């Protein structure tokens, strides 16, 4: 991601809100309008929800970049398999990694872009020593675990703080993203916006995506 994938705001639809009974059809419906999809892996330990794993990712047929968000207690055990499946970027949680630099280094060794996520109650200042090693930081604008939650406005301040910390750092925002909250994030420099239900529940997914970009 340090190669600045896109100049405009990147929209990363979260497939957690898609119909898993026809997942590849769902992804195909948004493929012409985006450059990446967001994959939320949850283990029912770090967050109170269980989603999907490598078997589902293996079955995904797409040319889009796969951006994988690990909401799990032990991210290390997923990394090699994700690399083999062609995942482009991996995000691990600051709160889940006591040896964060080691995990970030391993992600990059495996040829993937490395990112760290912070929960709403985690201050940006705690990332000072790891930011130089990152391609991206993911600001959670809801408490992780479930889709469809309301945007927590303190995320906006965090985006600005991260941009001040490292100007070329990519900042991603995930949670409660709609046209209104997307503008708040874009205005302070957010580079990537993750949206699930806002896109997949829309009658016109192209229009929904466009409303987040500009």
Image (cartoon, helix red, strand yellow):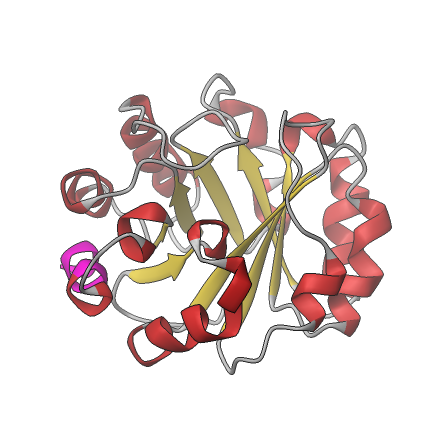
Residue 60's place in the image compared with 11, above or below, is below
Q: Estimate the x, y position of residue 41 in percent, counting from the top left.
A: 64, 47
Q: Which residues are magenta?
A: 208-214
Q: Residue furthest front?
A: 21
From the viewer's perspective, is 20 left or right of 84?
left
Does the rendering let one see residue 60? yes
**Residue nearest the viewer, comparing 115 with 58:** 58
Residue 130's place in the image compared with 190, above or below, is above
Q: Residue at x 81, y 64 (%)?
A: 81
Q: How many marks?
A: 0
From the viewer's perspective, is 30 left or right of 102?
left
From the viewer's perspective, is 102 left or right of 139?
right
**Residue nearest the viewer, comparing 170 with 203:** 203
Q: Estimate the x, y position of residue 31 in percent, counting from the top left.
A: 38, 77
Does the rendering let one see residue 2? no
Q: Residue at x 86, y 49 (%)?
A: 77
- Residue 182 lies in the magenta stretch: no
Q: Residue furthest top?
A: 121
């Amino acid at each position: 991601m340090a190669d600045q994938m896109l100049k405009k705001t990147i929209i990363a639809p979260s497939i957690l809100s898609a119909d898993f009974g026809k997942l590849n059809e769902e992804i195909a419906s948004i493929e012409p309008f985006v450059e990446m999809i967001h994959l939320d892996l949850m283990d029912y330990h770090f967050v109170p929800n269980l989603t999907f794993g490598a078997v589902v990712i293996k079955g995904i047929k797409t040319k889009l970049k796969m951006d994988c968000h690990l909401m799990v207690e032990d991210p290390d055990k997923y990394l090699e398999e994700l690399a083999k499946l062609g995942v482009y970027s991996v995000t691990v949680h600051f709160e889940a990694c006591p040896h964060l630099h080691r995990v970030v280094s391993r992600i990059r060794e495996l040829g993937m872009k490395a990112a760290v996520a912070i929960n709403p109650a985690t201050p940006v200042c705690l990332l000072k020593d790891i930011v130089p090693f990152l391609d991206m930081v993911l600001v959670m604008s809801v408490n992780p675990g479930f889709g469809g939650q309301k945007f927590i406005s303190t995320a906006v301040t965090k985006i600005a703080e991260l941009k001040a910390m490292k100007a070329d750092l990519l900042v991603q925002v995930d949670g409660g993203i709609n046209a209104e909250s997307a503008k708040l994030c874009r205005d302070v420099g957010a580079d990537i916006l993750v949206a699930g239900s806002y896109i997949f529940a829309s009658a016109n997914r192209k229009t929904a995506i466009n409303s987040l970009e500009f």
